[in-house]
Amino acid sequence: MTKERITNVLIKMNRESADIRDAVFALLDEGSSWFSAAPDGTKFCDGASTAHIGAHIAILQRGSDAKLDREGRDYWIKPLIEVGAIEPCYLPSKNDKELMAKGFKFYSGHIKAKSPNSSYRLAPSFVQILKSDNWEELLSDWFKQESVRRRLQLQALAAEEAKKLADNSHTKLIQASINHYVPAFLPEYEVLYVDDGDGDRVTQEQRDRLSSVGLSIELGDAMPDVLLFNEKLKALWVIEAVTSDGEVDSHKVTQMKNFAKRHGIMNIGFTTTYPTWKKLAERQTKTKANVAIDTFIWVLESGSTQLQVGSPL
């Protein structure tokens, strides 16, 4: 497969760019999977993470040591997801017992929020077009609106079935933080943004909600699991729900304070939530106490209290 062929197809689709072309080229790679725990015989093209694709483009294709920015997926992956040419997929971990029982393979959809096993692959019908000598005629039929709608519908149904079997503990903790922590400790705050999936980075509904209070998200912004706003105080509050990683550390505080300052907001608070005390202890032992000073900790299993992280006088 040549990049010239990929470019010609993308031009016909009005989706051509160097990054998109190279992402497609990467996802055609029939070499071994870059997932260390993937089943024997698994290929790169069976499913590759954003980081894998970015590194493939930068290092293997362009000879650079700086892989593409992960958030750039909005520009070099999403345009082909929108038309069904690229499919989100997911490789189960050992904790996904029901999925593993059905088979250790890539399943449709990003069914576990913020998982490093969330991946992408080319739709088989799109690969057929790329490899066909009669690609223009095949593309004409494939790209009709009804065909696109049908492909996306089938992808969504497959992803939903897999999601029912996956361990969504992170999503559940985010929802518990919203449903229990916020009413108890932040009753005057409203939810503006929730990142409990790995599809569109920011939905149009969330953009509209953010815009209604004068906020906008740019490509480089590192958004939290939950962003809250207090209209009366003109204040923001950040929640990071931790089941594997992602505490409110000093780097997250700096990023979000910069975000707030850009919008003229000087008041912003932070909370890290955990499902259990065991998980809190496990994470803080591993990270050598990385939760930022002057932020809060809330544990779901004893949700009537919160802790404030302090420093020596």
Image (cartoon, grey):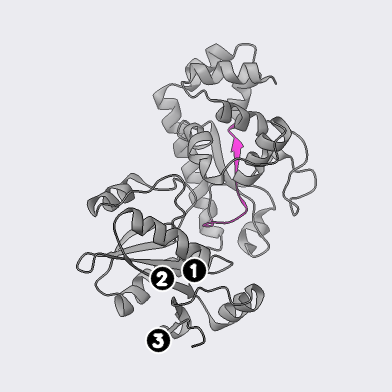
Q: What whole-number distance in Å separates the C-alpha atoms at marks 3 and 2?
A: 15 Å
- The location of residue 276, given as percent across then percent down, is 53, 80
Q: Kindly indicate the quadrant of the structure image that contains residue 149.
A: top left
Q: What whole-number distance in Å separates the C-alpha atoms at marks 3 and 1?
A: 18 Å
- The location of residue 4, given as percent across then percent down, is 64, 16
180 versus 72 height, above or below: below
The question of residue 57 being in magenta is answered with no
Please, what secondary structure does the residue beneath circle 2 have? strand
Marks 1 and 2 in Cβ contact (< 8 Å): yes
Residue 227 seen anywhere in this rendered image of the structure: yes
Q: Earlier in the sequence, mark 1 or mark 2?
A: 1
Residue at 58% in and 56% down:
115
Q: What whole-number distance in Å separates the C-alpha atoms at marks 1 and 2?
A: 7 Å
Which one is nearer the viewer's eye here, 30 or 8? 8
136 versus 77 height, above or below: above
Which mark is on residue 305?
3
Query: The N terminus is located in which quarter?
Result: top right
Magenta part of the chain = 112-123
Which mark is on residue 270?
2
Q: Earlier in the sequence, mark 3 or mark 1?
A: 1
State left or right for residue 50 relative to residue 183. Answer: right
Please, what secondary structure does the residue beneath circle 1 have? loop
Which residue is denoted by mark 1 in the rendering?
248
Q: Residues within 10 Å of mark 1 (few under 14, many from 20)?
A: many
Task: Name the residue furthest left.
Answer: 232
152 versus 279 height, above or below: above
Q: Callout 2, which amino acid?
A: Phe
Residue at 57% in and 26% down:
18
